[in-house]
Amino acid sequence: MVILSDSIIEIHFPKLNHFWMDAGLFGLYRIAQKEQAKEYGVEITLDDNGVSFKGSEKNVQLFLQKIYDRLLKDYYNTSSQNQIEKNEGFYYDTTKDQFIRFPKVKPMGIAGLVKISGQSYKNQGVVKFEKSIESQKKSQNPILEEKYSFLQDRFEKFLADTKLKPGTALLLNGKNIVTPSIHIEKLSGKSKGRCFICGKESHSLSDIGGTVFPFITGSSGVLSFNNLGGSAEKVCWKCDYIAKFVPVAGFYNVNRDTTTHIYFPYSTSLEKMNDVFRSLDLTKIEDPYLMKNFDNTRLGGYFQKSYEQFFTFLYSLYRVVMTKRTSSSASDEDYELDYEALYNLNLNKAPLDFFVVYTESLGDAQMGKMIWQFHESIYIFRILDHLEKNKIDLKNVMTLLVDHEQPKNESKTILRNRVCENILKKQSVVALVEQHAFRINKSSKTHNIKPLNDFVILYEKAIRQGETGMDQKIIDVAVSVGKTIGMSIAPSGKKGKGDLFRLRKTRKPEDFLNEINRIQMKYGTKVNADLYKEGQKMEENFTEFKQFCMIAALNMYNAGNPSPVETDGKPKAEASS
Ligand SMILES: [Zn+2]
């Protein structure tokens, strides 16, 4: 037994400037705020250096245990709607002399990544099953250990009535609770060595394991704490403890039970993280199935890959936190960028970044496939605002970027994922969009691409402000030439479309100009004279120039040759003209 002193101590958990550990540190603080520290005589402080708990050693210990219990209840011992409906767990209550059913639990979201071993489950005691093979043969049901043989008949009847599976032992007097072990029996003492994570000396060290950092191995090895099969590194009780709180701070979305996308708000300033937590938390929703904790449906469906998922997350954040109604009487659909929110979230004290983690499950291990830091929150909120102010329906754009012709579901959004990646990185998307627009309008297919056309022009102009390369004026010339061509060939239907595809096939500026001349002769088109005045710039930026031109031309052609019936952007029948 450990004797704790009554003298006042201060336990300091330092900020380590590692996104995972800092998420845990911040999670610890948030959960601590939900409990009554004063009643425990414990004082909590947070500043940019970390979080401190001050009080008698005994009280601090009791309080740390209290907030840990709260964490386990809220984040680790959660039941999905499915588990609640099935109600598959049960135990035998010795006082009431009856079997009690309960929903099984599954750590949700990010807590689900923390590697829980069988030893992490704690219970009030069990009735063991007889091991002898003979007894197993006689009956389908397991035989209860001798002490409880009086219960055997009722146990079998209970299983038969409920059709529940017996498991590996009969629980007694309570549920099985997920309880990864922590080491807070003693909060200070003589040093036994250094912690692998924080580098500080500690009296209490244990083997580092999956409950500290779940990504046991990554393809690159970067995420691994195990040094090539050598002995496991040691971690101090503090790092071991705060790592369990990581799930509190993050956003997540699970795809088909195998991949998990996680976003951690991150700032070099812990105070800043605390300041913005409340507003970021507004983005959280409760999903009864425990598959996500933010609304990822605002831009439509089918979001599955890493960048497109993150884009929907940022959009959700933008709509919930970064916009406000244009006036008090305005509807939900009349909103604008809230510059005060933008300032508070992004600029005040220190910028707010996001750590994006994408993992795939490999049996019972989670492989971290990708971890990266997103620095461009301000840019993304501004560009979203700019696009929406100019009447771009982003949900429509995102829906149009799904490639329904791909046979496999996971391939349907490869292109959209690349477009989202480029947007997040402030890079051009015109090449991707042009390719897609022509693919979905091949031969006799007609797909309205107006939202894509409008989006690409506005987006490309916005990201080129003050940049070198093709400038806004040349984009305007390309679009104008495209429009004129599209309009003049539209009345000729299929024949015109053939000429459009022929123009698209040209690989050199001379051929492109020749083809345009041919179209002018054939259809009496009069293209913008700037095409020739700006010939030099057109040649320098030929590939992109042609892409803008082709999207605009296809858009105008389609306007004159609409698909007979359209629902959800998908033609019910092919255009027949
Ligand atoms: Zn440590």
Image (spheres, rainbow, N blue to C red):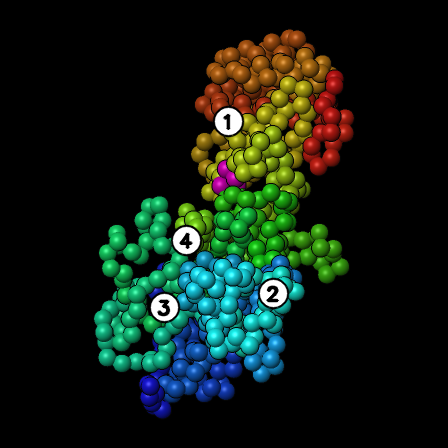
Q: Earlier in the sequence, mark 2 or mark 4?
A: 2
Which residue: 27% across, 81% down?
189
Query: Residue under circle 1?
Result: 544
Marks 1 and 4 in Cβ contact (< 8 Å): no
x and y percentages locating residue 51 in the rendered image: 40, 73
x and y percentages locating residue 358 in the rendered image: 46, 49
**Numbered badge on residue 365:** 4
Which residue: 60% across, 48% down?
385
As measured in the structure, the alpha-carbon distance from the residue carrying label 2 to the one carrying label 4 is: 32 Å
Query: Residue under circle 3?
Result: 240
Disc nearest the viewer among 1 and 3: 3
Disc nearest the viewer among 2 and 1: 2
Callout 1 crowding tier (Cα within 10 Å): few <14, some 14–19, many ≥20: many
Which residue: 66% across, 26% down?
555
Q: Is residue 152 highlighted in magenta?
A: no
Q: Earlier in the sequence, mark 2 or mark 1?
A: 2
Callout 3 crowding tier (Cα within 10 Å): few <14, some 14–19, many ≥20: many
Callout 4 crowding tier (Cα within 10 Å): few <14, some 14–19, many ≥20: some
Image position of 93 with respect to 278: above or below: below
Residue 295 sits in quarter? bottom right
- Segment tinted magenta in the rendering: 417-421
Query: Residue under circle 2?
Result: 159
As measured in the structure, the alpha-carbon distance from the residue carrying label 4 to the one carrying label 3 is: 19 Å
